Image (cartoon, helix red, strand yellow):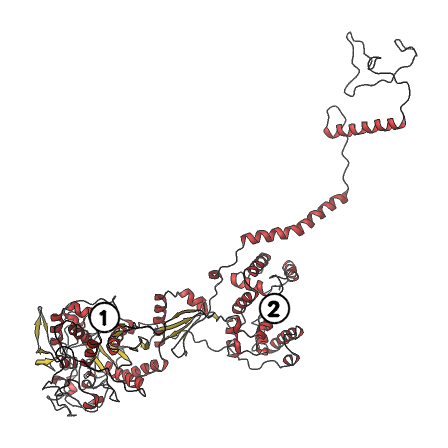
Amino acid sequence: MPPGAPGNGRVPPQRYRADGPPVTQQGGAQRPPYSSGDMPLLTHDETGATSVAREGALAVAERTEVVSGAPGMPQKPARKGSPWRRVRRILYVLLGLAVIGPLLAFVIGWMIFSVPSSDEAALTQVATFTFADDQPLATVRPENVNRVKVTLDKVPQHTREAVLAAEDATFYSNPGFDITGIARAIFNQLTGGIGGGSTITQQYVKVSTGHDESSLWRKYKEVVLAVKISREQSKDQILENYLNTIYLGRGAYGVQAAAKAYFGKDVQDLTIGEGAMLAGTIQSPSNWDPAKSRPDAERRWNFVMDQMAERGWITAAERAQPFPTNWLPEAPSLGGVPDDDRYHIYEKAIQELAAKGITQDQIDTEGLTITTTVQQPRQAQAVEAIKKVMKGQPDNLRTALVSIDPKTGAILAYYGGANGLGTDYANAMRQPGSSFKPFVLAAALQSNKGIGLGSLYDGSSPQVFEGQSVSNSEGFNCDSCTVQTAMTKSINTIFYRMAVDVGTQRVADAAHQAGIPSDVELAARGGIALGDSEVHPVDMASAFATFADDGERHEPYIVSKVVAADGRVLFDRGDAAGEQAVPQQVARNVTESMIDVASSSRIALSDGRPVASKTGTVQLNKTNQNKDAWTVGYTPSISTAVWVGSDFSDPIKNSAGQPIFGRMLPGSIWQEFMNSALRGTPKEQFSKFVPMGVPPAADPALNPNPSGSLSPSDTPGDNSDENDGRGGRGNGNGNGRGNSDDGSNGNSDDNSDSGFGGGGGLFDSNDGNGGDSSDNSSGNSNDNSNSDNGTGNND
């Protein structure tokens, strides 16, 4: 028995601390781990249950120590996980991504992709300009795109259903995209195939955003925007937009343009078979055009018709109809914007639209129909009159004609030149010469000086006014002439005196009052009496129209109505009221002053109807040459201004080499046009004439009629077949007052018309003498145009 053992000779089990050997006592002796005071001796073995519990507790402790990495304890390696566990985890992650990923991507796309605004989605489409009777004038195709929008109600139900059958039969029930179609598109993209599964909504998104590249990104964006658009727009709205944007071949965008291109009719007139044929071309317009491949077009047509029949959209009888055969072999010409005289009408309309706030962008994208006031027959008459009179004339001559309805201000004819891409001479600035004299009279009648058509003035020549020598033509002088005679004979010295007496600013104000625009600067100096300030031909036609309508002014206009493709009326002129700008009596007296000019100049109208007119000629500097020539005149229903000149203010001569005066080429064009335009219309009379100031009195030399006015029937020289001469009063051969056919004796209704001639020259234009006098002695006035021989009367 070892020393120190218990008396019974048994040694208790030895336990060592896990962290080291037994603890030694002081002096080096080992202290037993247990003593009678520390732990009672075990007097019996552990039970099974106790042992198991203790072993379990120890195992837990050991595992805890291993995991926690307690120092001094041996580390047990962790058990490796099962390979299948990793596979399951990967599958769980992939499944989560498959479910959550698309939702997350859709949410992100919803936040970053915006539905195109109305401006961004706006597509170019055709704008149509028409004459007043809706006949086509110009067709504007921005970016050369042929598109005309129509509202959905204009598209027949069967045509809509044909498109659904061809492209998206579930359109009205799907959310804007098709899952199976998208899956097919993704597969094709990944495998290098082509084609996809776009719904009508997705196709509309593609077109409206301009993103038509073949990529998964585009498909992703399409889906998101398709859903967003479906929430913001009704299905009918989406379908309408789609039908107006989709390309159907032959340069046609939208069903309206396609109906015209394939069948030459409007979309609302399409039959079931025709609508199905158009719908069939959508997927491949270049291949399924019947003109290119009828078998392919017919096969696709059968597919569309079968789909419609299966869905009950057409009856068996309707399905049995044959393939349409009335399609056009090629699309009809779209006209475009003409480059002849009609271009100036279009250009003038564009300017007017801009002034009314209708922009070029609206013209390009809203499918506008712009109705102009120009009457197609009268435009043709203007062109014909100009061609007839100007045939054989020198190439440097240019012509303008503007005709206006005095009662409304509507422009009835507008000719700015044969070259539409060149200068618009109807809107060019030119000096009007003596055709400006009626404004001098209008100012005088309102000056409270008692001036009337019977007032007498010194008409001798030359005279000096404010240091300026003014002369009449050598063809007419008078020591004392009435205002009526001065207008008929266009006596410079009388009108210059009148302007100075009443004030040149009053003359400028009277011109603006009648209708010369306020932004046209009129120099308030003596030369204004003879038309030295530049104006537009359209201004003169408009201002004379005010006199024609007894002083009621209507702003000239060329656009009467603007309607967008969706039916919105952007502008409607309607019956705009005029303004009594010139007192009625003043306007009527001005008219009366010009009542004899046409017959005196042998450009009276053929049916003898009342007409007031004034000619004008502008001298070229101080030469005996002229640079501008005018005739402006009116009846109660039409006011027309005609100008003849050149691009560079060169001397203007006729084919005979003679200087051109207002009553010659311009007068002949004016007469020809007015006769054509008024043929068959009622012979209107001007309103009752009530004289102002000094009433018209008998002029022993020129006007023995006490009324001071000759009716057309009193004028034997009407229409130039007989030489009026007015001096001989009834002597058709012009024997009164010398020879009326002789410009030197004054049948020259425009004796000056110099307007400074662009260079401040003398106011003596030698009217009535000029180059015309060489042939005047013949007294032959059978040629109304006087375009070649310069006969007779000079203005």
Q: Quadrant of the N terminus?
A: top right
Q: Residues within 10 Å of mark 2 (few under 14, many from 20)?
A: many
Q: Residue 360 is drawn in which quadrant?
A: bottom left
Disc number placed over residue 513 in the picture, else none: 1
In the image, farthest residue toward the left: 479
Q: Label 2 is placed on what type of residue?
A: Glu
In the image, farthest residue toward the top: 27
At 62% from the left edge and 81% from the top edge, which residue is drawn? 322
Q: Is residue 37 left or right of residue 709?
A: right
**Residue 432, horizontal then vertical, whole percent:** 21, 74
Q: Label 1 is placed on what type of residue?
A: Gln
The image shows residue 178, relative to residue 132, as above or below, that is above
Marks counted in the figure total 2
The image shows residue 533, relative to residue 228, as above or below, that is below
Disc number placed over residue 209 in the picture, else none: none
Disc number placed over residue 167 in the picture, else none: 2
